[in-house]
Amino acid sequence: MTDSASSLRERRKAETARALTVAARRLTIENGLSGFTVDELAEEAGVSRRTFFNYFASKENAVIGVPVDRDESGAGERFAAAGARGTAHLVDDLIALHLERWSFGGITADDVAQIVRAFEREPKLIGHMLSLAGEHERDDIELVERREGFLAGDLRAAAAVQLTGAILRASAEEFFRAGSTDDLPSIVRRRVAVVRELFH
């Protein structure tokens, strides 16, 4: 497959995923999760039910924007394949991993506003999102263990992933706050620098 054909395929895939998440959020805000079916959601986005399940495992995942292939960008595999660099580099490398995922996902302030409205209509989505976040955290801990050659359960892997997660959550809150003018990478790096100060 040529590069242009591959990029066209990726663009169409991104457009389909986007159409499904936009439709899922709108239908949830208007009708609640039980107020529409997967078939209706797929029809709204102009795809088949089967195609929907190629992109998302559930309506809830479509609303939140979590695809079936969580590592669509390949960032996680590249992180693991880079090989051990030692614990001194873990937080920086995990930050870079998350920023690459963020860039690939292309989430906007409008997306966040729609998700918040969907959560207000369906509070149970918050619990679902927290469950997914826990799964993602466990996946990232395994990535670190694999890359660094740690035994399963090594607390260094968990601590690095959890510290990075806390920095990213606080940074995202600042990024989406009304009046914020800094880009997300700048906010994240500023917070990482403060964390370094605390530990030196």
Image (cartoon, grey):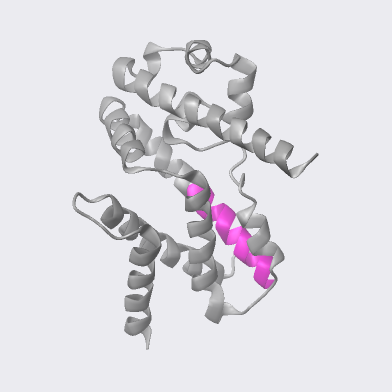
Viewer-closest of 91 and 190:
190
Q: Nearer the viewer, residue 79 or 35?
A: 79
Magenta: main secondary structure equals helix
Choose between 7 and 98: the one closer to the eye.
7
Q: Position of residue 76 (x, y in %)?
A: 62, 56
How many marks on residues? 0
Q: Which image quadrant is residue 195 in?
A: bottom left
Name the residue at the front extreme. Answer: 4
Residue sitting at 58 percent across and 16 percent down? 47
Query: Could one spot residue 135 in this view of the protein?
Result: yes
- In reply to whether residue 138 is colored magenta, the answer given is yes
Which residues fall within the magenta stretch? 134-150
Q: Is residue 145 above or below residue 128?
A: below
Location of the N terminus by quadrant is top right
- Can you say whether 98 is above or below 54 in the image? below
Q: Position of residue 98 (x, y in %)?
A: 50, 58
Q: Position of residue 167 (x, y in %)?
A: 37, 64
In the rendered view of the protein, which quadrant contains the C terminus? bottom left
